[in-house]
Amino acid sequence: MAPYIYWFLLALVLLALEMATGTFYMLVLGLALGVGGIVALLGMSLPLQLTLCAVTGIVGTVILRRSKFGRPDAALNQGLDIGQPVQVVVWKEDGTARVHYRGAEWDAEPESTDTPRDQTLYIKTMRGSILILTHLKL
């Protein structure tokens, strides 16, 4: 079997995996293998096929990493929690708090040391599983 057929078969396998994962990285690698197949179809040497495939994969990955498709949007993942009021259960001596939110107790920190403790507090952001609180309604 001709070498370009192997290139295209591998590209198709990665494109099929892309359909299952939805990460776009498999798409970039599948396209890089497709470039290797085109170079093989043109009758160029194996080292040139491998080099162009690798360069295409690296360049595509770098472009993808810098685009919005290459990284999850943290605000999108936290969007439902931002601005929600919380009930402070207890303030600890170190300035952190335990708050009641979504039927459970969470660790929380005020956004600054001058955040009032006697008002209703709202979620400004999340750092891991720790809620960052503000007194300003968002």
Image (spheres, rainbow, N blue to C red):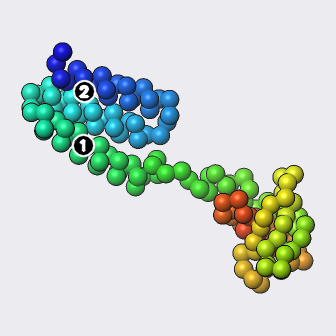
Q: Amino acid at mark 1?
A: Ala
Give neighbour class at mark 1: few <14, some 14-19, many 20+ (Cα, 10 Å). Answer: some
Using the image as rendered, state which of residue 46 and residue 133 is in the foreground: 46
The residue that disc 2 covers is: 7
Quadrant of the frame with the C terminus: bottom right
> Is residue 12 rendered to the left or right of residue 23?
left
Q: Secondary structure at mark 2?
A: helix
Q: Estimate the x, y position of residue 55 in percent, counting from the top left.
A: 23, 46
Which residue is situated farthest in the bottom direction here? 114
Q: Which numbered tag is attached to residue 132?
A: none
> Is residue 60 rendered to the left or right of residue 76?
left
Residue at point 29%, 43% (across, down)? 57
Q: Distance of mark 1 from mark 2, alpha carbons?
A: 13 Å
Q: Which numbered tag is attached to residue 54?
A: 1
Quadrant of the frame with the N terminus: top left
Instruction: Please indicate, yes or no, whether residue 44 appears anywhere in the rendered image.
Output: yes
In which quarter of the view is residue 84 placed? bottom right
In which quarter of the view is residue 4 placed? top left
Q: Amino acid at mark 2?
A: Trp
Q: Estimate the x, y position of residue 14 in percent, counting from the top left.
A: 38, 30
Q: Earlier in the sequence, mark 1 or mark 2?
A: 2
Which residue is situated farthest in the front direction here? 93
The relative height of residue 44 versus residue 98 in the rendered view (above or below) is: above
Q: Estimate the x, y position of residue 96 in percent, counting from the top left.
A: 79, 74
